[in-house]
Image (cartoon, grey):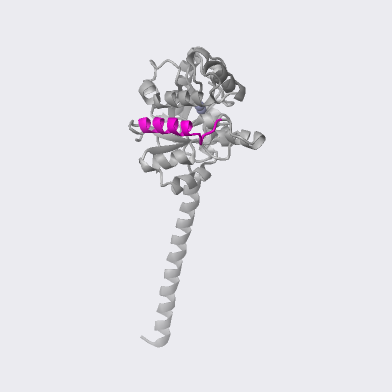
Amino acid sequence: MGFVATVKWILIALAIIYGIFIIINGYLKAKKITSKRIYSDYHVHSKFCDGHDEIEDIVDVAIEKNMPKIGFSSHSYLPSEMGWPMTKEGTEEYKKVVTELKGKYKNQIEILLGVEQDYWSPTDDLSDYDYVIGSVHSILEQDTKNSAVDGLTKSFEYAAENYFDGDKMAAAERYFELVSDLYDRTHCDVIGHFDLITKYNEKCMKEEGKPFVDSDDPRFVEAERKALEKLVATPVIFEINTGGMARGYRTSPYPSERVLKFLSEHNTPVILGSDSHEKENLCYGFDEVMELVKKYNLNLVYDPRNK
Ligand SMILES: [Zn+2]
Ligand SMILES: [Zn+2]
């Protein structure tokens, strides 16, 4: 082979190698971008409880976002409350609608029928659901309205004043006692917003210079630790919930980094949930949460039915 022919073949070989490099590089880039953007979301509210949108409209947004799966988690029926939980009749309608849409959209997205089971709701009718999120929203069964931990700050203050002799930390201890009992009571798959009681801390810190409930108080830390120890011994997934971020109360998700560290040490599975009440907030803040998942090397699962 002459010199010119050799050079020609070397150039052709280099061109082929370069071409392959460009293709592989492009593929890896595309994969990185795509994988960064695609999430599923299992904590989603609709008009069946206190969400703003129809289920089908939320499904449309989820499909636009290329979400592989979406799980609906309406608030369970709670006889003593009106407005935010589902009604008894509404619960049956909710199951029917989600089940119909599962079939209708089965080629575009996997839809799961879930429920956000309030601690005080009846637990006799959970078998129809694909998964259950267990949540504590109030600390007193006889007065759920005035003991809400995520309602107005004054309702929690009222509860502390009237039922715990003004001892806020005793109310916090009661909250974590109930949270620790969530699996035993509901057999939930997921623990919803584990430290919801810290909802107003950042806001109060900013406005009043002190947190609403001091999460560094030794009594708080101890109550939290006891609840964690009990729950990590059960087959539950902990939710990393961005609901407070979407609503502007917080700049970080539930639970705190201290809790995430504990979950990491116990290799407890975690899952992402937006707790969205508006379809625009599906998967809200999940990119930021992924940084925490990486930072604490958390055991992230992608489906509440996978433990
Ligand atoms: Zn909730
Ligand atoms: Zn919720």
Which residue is most to the right? 207
On the rendered structure, is 107 left or right of 50? left
Depicted 283 relative to depicted 158: above or below: below
Which residue is most to the bottom? 2
258, 192: nearer the viewer: 258
Report the label total: 0
The residue located at (37%, 31%) in the rendering is: 231
Q: Is residue 225 magenta?
A: yes
Which percent across, then down, holds residue 265?
Answer: 37, 43
Quadrant where the N terminus lies? bottom left
On the rendered structure, is 4 left or right of 213? left
Depicted 190 relative to depicted 33: above or below: above
Which percent across, then down, holds residue 110?
Answer: 43, 34
Which percent across, then down, holds residue 128?
Answer: 38, 21
Depicted 53 relative to depicted 264: above or below: above
276, 184: nearer the viewer: 184
Residue 205 is at least partly visible in this image: yes
On the rendered structure, is 53 left or right of 131? right
Depicted 127 relative to depicted 107: above or below: above
Residue 194 is at least partly visible in this image: no
260, 290: nearer the viewer: 260
Region of the chain picked out in magenta, as a range: 213-231
Q: Is residue 64 magenta?
A: no
Which percent across, then down, holds residue 80?
Answer: 51, 12
- Report the magenta stretch's main SS: helix
Quadrant where the C terminus lies? top left
Q: Where is residue 261, by image quadrant? A: top left
